[in-house]
Image: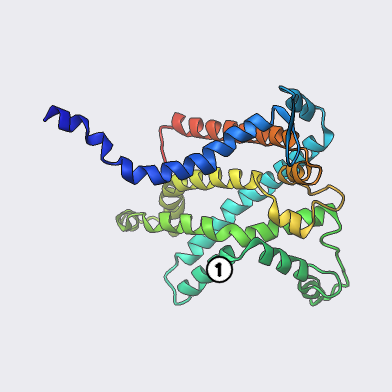
Amino acid sequence: MKQKRSLNWLKPLPFLLPFLLVYLVFTVYPIAKGLQMSLFDWTLIEKKGFRGFDHYARLLEDPDFWSSLGNTMLFVILSTPTMILLALGLALLANIQTTLQSIFRGAFFIPSILSVSVISYLAIFMLQPYTGFVNNAIQMFGTDAEPFWLNNPTLAWLSIVAVTLWWTVGFNLILFLTALQDIPDQLYEAAEIDGATRTQMFFKITLPQLVPIARVVLLLQVLASFKVFAQILLITDGGPGTATRPLIQYIYEIGFVRFDLGYASAMSYALFFLLLLLSIAQIRGRGKEGSMI
């Protein structure tokens, strides 16, 4: 009997092995291979000499690395708070019991299912000077302004952030909407009996109940924003100049345009450790407040 119990741990293995193999091949192996590549000179087709930590020392003196990292952090700062507020506002709107509820939910979520190439093409088409929808809409209000949205660094950043918010807000909206629907109705009924106003119920019941999911959205959004790449590559190609080039695009250029995979791997690991530190700091901060997801 005791021997039978000791072998019970073997029963889940047939179910876990397929996933474990896929995880090892497509996640663990690339991570280990990337670390190895960061320690060598490595072209697209062959490994060359051992460089130790030279690539890591090189990135500390590379102005393009720091400017690209600065662009990435600017995108994180611009997009993360606006994404959370926008997703929360749209979730509250989509949670209102009206005949338009299904339309709101569908309209807010549909952009999330589009591919990055589609949303990038739409953005370029709508932001064109002279013929674009956005400039024509502005001129309908009686102004002759003809902004070149993708040729000015400030306007280019505003365009990229706006397009990203429109494209990805649907996923965060669903998270907030699910949390809103999990709030017990008894809390609102008790507050109503006590004479609480709608505003008081929002700040005393709704917002505190949304704090756990807001932390999840914050963590996911920060990680996603640090990995921004495709929409910037397709809409501005990092321009004008390198004003909007994020770190991932710089890593891509070093690895697959200049074929310096060793240095590209070292920068990838630098970004990995930065994200790891941010994630640990956020999780430890949540732990100190005694609240878990």
Q: Is residue 228 above or below residue 129?
A: above
Relative to residue 128, is residue 9 drawn left or right? Answer: left
| Number of callouts | 1
Q: Is residue 248 above or below residue 8?
A: below
Let me know if residue 265 appears in the view: yes
Whole-percent x, y for residue 1 in the image: 11, 30
Please name the amino acid that badge 1 sits on.
Ile
Q: Is residue 140 above or below residue 65?
A: below
Whole-percent x, y for residue 77 in the image: 68, 44
Whole-percent x, y for residue 113 in the image: 56, 65
Taking the spot 48% from the left edge, 42% from the top edge, the residue there is: 23
Taking the spot 67% from the left edge, 49% from the top edge, the residue there is: 228
Q: Which residue is mark 1?
A: 110
Relative to residue 282, is residue 99 drawn left or right? Answer: left
Relative to residue 293, is residue 131 drawn left or right? Answer: right
Taking the spot 75% from the left edge, 54% from the top edge, the residue there is: 233
Residue that sits furthest to the left in the current view: 1
Q: Quadrant of residue 64?
A: top right
Whole-percent x, y for residue 166 in the image: 63, 62
Let me know if residue 199 appears in the view: no
Specify the quadrant that holds the C terminus: top left
